[in-house]
Amino acid sequence: MMLALEGVTKRFGGLTAVRRVTLEVPTGTLLGIIGPNGAGKTTLFNVVGGYYRPEEGRILFEGRDITGVPPHAVCRLGLTRTFQIVKPFGNLSVLDNVMIGSLTRLTRVRDARLDAERVIEMCGLAPYTAARAKALPIGLRKRLEVARALATRPRLLLLDEVMAGLNPAELGGIVELIRRIHAEGLTLMVIEHIMAAMMRLAQRIVVLHHGEKIAEGTPAQIASDRRVIDAYLGEEFVLAEA
Amino acid sequence: MRARLARHRGAVVFFGLAALAPLFVHDAFFLDSLILILLWGALSAAWNVASGYAGQVSLGHAAFFGIGAYSAALLSTRWQQSPWLGMLVGVIVSIAAGSVIGYLSNRLRGPYFALSTIAFSQVLLIVASRWRGFTAGSEGIPVPFRPGFSTLGLSHPAWVYLALSLALLYYLVQLYFERSRVGYQLAGVREDEDAAAALGIASRQLKVIAVMLSAALSSIGGTLWAQYVGFVDPFYVFSVDLSVRFALNTIIGGIGTAMGPYLGSIFITSLETYLRATFSGKTGYAGGYLVIYGCALILVVRFAPEGLTGIAARLRSRFMAIAR
């Protein structure tokens, strides 16, 4: 088991953003997380990544309790996350951005540069290697976010809405990229609103609503789940899929 | 190798000329200016490590300078110890103080951190100026001149080489902060701390280490300065003016660049020396140099906020464009 959440609860004052969520991410799978805005998806990522400490519950990464471990240490253990609102190192080049990720595992700058160039190539960012990160359009900045996270060589990668705001061409590219890194054996946990993409990528999907897990299953099971349709998908999606 | 040297052309020229100067010039006034340019440059480089590379802008680095100055002066006048031993004591005390300041940088950000560093240096100023029994209070401590390397009683040319060694060493330290793994990681921390953490960078530890190192380097500079000048005045060595000098040299030269502190020091130190010499004799113009000094600062900050190294880079690229 790559990751296991046991009854995780996160409150902000009177608001319970995540309530007793229990879920498992088996090694090698791609788990999708869906749910309406404010359902607690990003909060869940922040809890797993060590940015928030949960009030209740435990988080086990490869069987090891990482509840309350700070973010940088979580990453070093092999669990890297991206940010929904991308956080590139704006004044640095694409190469430097990815190198900083590589340097988490590699100690020599020269090795990191070669490694970063490979990752950049794999993510289709090679033409922009020398560009300043903040000069890139959003589609490429999302890619950079993924590239930088990949450079840390995680065993579990958390992607937070890397497809949001992209045009159809960009979308196709990033779906292809995610499919490829998953095929290479990386375990992924993916938050996404774009259901068509999610249905194709995910092996299992967890649905959050008001901070609670209301359903879990294969994409087909989720698409026909009455509660999920009421809370999130709506009739139209089901009809369109059928 | 040649490409590597070309990248450091400015540094090679500057340090090379400084090394050759004592062989050809024997004018004491000139050598004195050169020593001060090198010492202030090195001290600004020390400031740059914490404030430029680690992004923890301090306005209290005079504290570490003063600790270094006082450690050596007190050990040599009270216990007849070598100033080198005093330098070591200063470094240890400064690292301890730097760890406290560095820890503060994790709690306080931006202006609040800068304010707390000012407060810290002011506390030391009060202690040094009031604790008459130990530090001789506001009278200050004259450092006796005893010829010899172990007592740092050196000739002007020897001082040039000592100051030059320090300046060169600090230049290399800065290069480390630019090109090494730590340098890249700190660049990430400066840009976005949360993103840096997500990539496995322990930003807090890095910042504390950078501030501690910067404190130690400042302290060494303080010891050498006091031994060179021969007098430790609490109102000078712990002054905000002095902290601001480190900051301004670096900002005018180019913050976060290895050559910036030295360029800033060449500019400011020689301007100040020249203006002071020009105006000091004329009654009614006392302090007139401060006005010109201030105007020069405003001009640089207004028209070249990235500093002299930025102007140099801009001119170079324009020149290349024309040449092509």
Image (spheres, grey):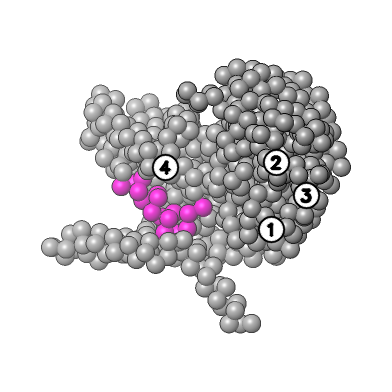
Q: At label 1, which amino acid type do we have? A: Asn
**Region of the chain picked out in magenta, as a range:** B241-256
Give whichever of A43, A222 is nearer the camera. Answer: A222
Residue B82 appears in the rendering: no
| CA–CA distance in space, label 1 to label 2 | 25 Å
Q: Which mark is residue A167?
A: 1
Q: What is the residue that sits farthest to the bottom in this orientation?
A: B323
Q: Which residue is mark 3?
A: A175
Residue B184 is situated, as x and y percent measured from the top left of the image, at: 63, 47
**Residue at mark 3: chain:** A
Chain of the residue on which disc 1 is drawn = A
Q: Which residue is mark 2?
A: A235
Question: In this rendering, which labeled residue sits more in front, label 4 or label 2?
Answer: 2
Where residue B319 appears, as percent x and y from the top left, is: 56, 78
* Label of residue B110 in the image: 4
* Percent of width and height locating residue B199: 66, 39
State whether discs 3 and 2 lie on one chain. Answer: yes
Amino acid at pointer 2: Glu
